[in-house]
Image (tube, rainbow, N blue to C red):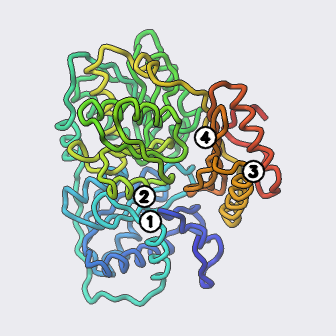
Amino acid sequence: MIHNPNYSLAFCSMFREYDIRGRVSEDELNPENVHKIVKAYAQYLQKRNINRAVVGYDSRDCSPSFAEAAIAALREEGIDVYFIGLALSPLTYFAQYHLKCEGAVMITASHNPNGWSGFKFANGYSKTLEPHDIIEVAELLDKPTQSKRFGAYEEVDVRDAYIEDIVSRIHMGPKKIRVALDAANGGAGLFIYEVFQRLGCMTFQLNCDPDTTFPHYFPNPSELECRERLRHMLRHPYVHADIGLSFDGDGDRIGVIDEKGQDVWSDIVLALLAKQLLEKKPGAKVIYDVKCSKALEDVVNANGGVPVMWKTGHSYIKSKLHELDAELAGERSGHIFVSGDDWYGFDDAIFVAAKLVEYLSNKEETVSEIIETFPHYVVSPETKAHCADTVKYGIVDDITKKMKAAYPGKVCDINGARVQFEHGWGLVRASSNMPELVLIFEADTMEHLLEIRSIFKSYTREYEEISDNWKNDIVEA
């Protein structure tokens, strides 16, 4: 969060670690404030001699008017605009390569609920703004216009080129795969059916028509309720799909269900992709965030790879991927990045889904049978405890200090506190996108997991600012 005396606390709170997100309201995001923020980003681009930008938006009621304000701000600062319309975040990143354009504005709040919006700003290819960049954009708010020219404008359709590029890179095996697809009425529905049909899959669609009211549930594959209808469809006697695939609203996060209807969390999805990669490229690095299961580390080591733990956050993971010249990276939240010869190094749920289907089509085993060979741990869902944006980072820093004192040498503090115990581990960190703390627990048995959960609960109960009613908790309130 930034501090600017010219703006309200609510406005300042929108400037987060690696993107900008806020509520659609008079104090936070509205066309006037969108114009101010994107104008500052345009000046950020000009300082780097970048004078062209792609603009796309997700499937929310506010998005078209915000796109109009963003386009006007960019052009006023002399930035030429390629407008791709209703899009996905990966489609916007792809359009940068396709149009040879280093700037990009994706208007989205990703998996935040309806009533929110925001921006993912690019700084070059497959790179989005990091904390120091976000601060720089904030410092450019209300600066006088620098440009003496008005930017050009062109509407461009890159959908077909994007689909063609994905399909051309996937090499299906002899097994014909049955795929159940759920877009939750988000923008991914405009793409996924055609991709998997062209790959030769038998496809079954659920909620693939974009609808800004999101009549069934909001597209967030991390939430348990968002997986139930897909689970029922996948197991229907007329479907019997080999895999269920769900997508968030802007298409950069994936959810997976195996052929038995069991949840496959994204760190295990990453383990599947790591196994696929390491069959071709032993010794490859695989980057993962602090929320991921130890099973992922075990699989990477067992298959001759190099596991690298890093901070949660799509910009952090993307940056580390490029820094280490790695070919695979991901987060437990569902952001997965494929780079090298396969893809461009940005988080793209549709391409990742296609890689999974490719892998299965070349294997005799089912998803569950492959996963059964992995080390098994009991893991909690991604649990949330409400905590105000203004205090959450300070509280997590305080909890981390206390835990490091209580468990010397057992706390990884690259992003919150991940504490290693004899039978498992637990994590508490501040959410970058919402006013809440994120907690995850993993252990060799459910009994040990609940013990670890109780330890973390004893720490959070020391702070009245942290809600004691945890959402998505493994224990019923």
Q: Which residue is mark 2?
A: 315
Rendered view: 444 above or below 434: above
Q: CA distance from mark 1 to mark 3?
A: 32 Å
- Sequence-earlier tag: 2 or 3: 2
Q: Nearer the viewer, mark 1 or mark 3?
A: 3
Q: Mark 3 or mark 4, which is nearer the start of the sequence?
A: 4
Structural distance between the alpha carbons of marks 4 and 2: 20 Å
- In terms of sequence position, does the residue under pointer 1 or pointer 4 come before the other? 1
Q: Are marks 4 and 3 in contact (CB under 8 Å)?
A: no
Q: Mark 3 = which residue?
A: 406
Residue at 45% from the left image edge and 56% from the top image edge: 108
Nearer-the-camera pick, 267 or 37: 267
Residue at mark 1: 130
Residue topped by disc 4:
382
> Is 172 on the left or on the right of 244, as rendered?
left
Whichever of callouts 4 and 2 sits on the residue coming sooner in the sequence is 2
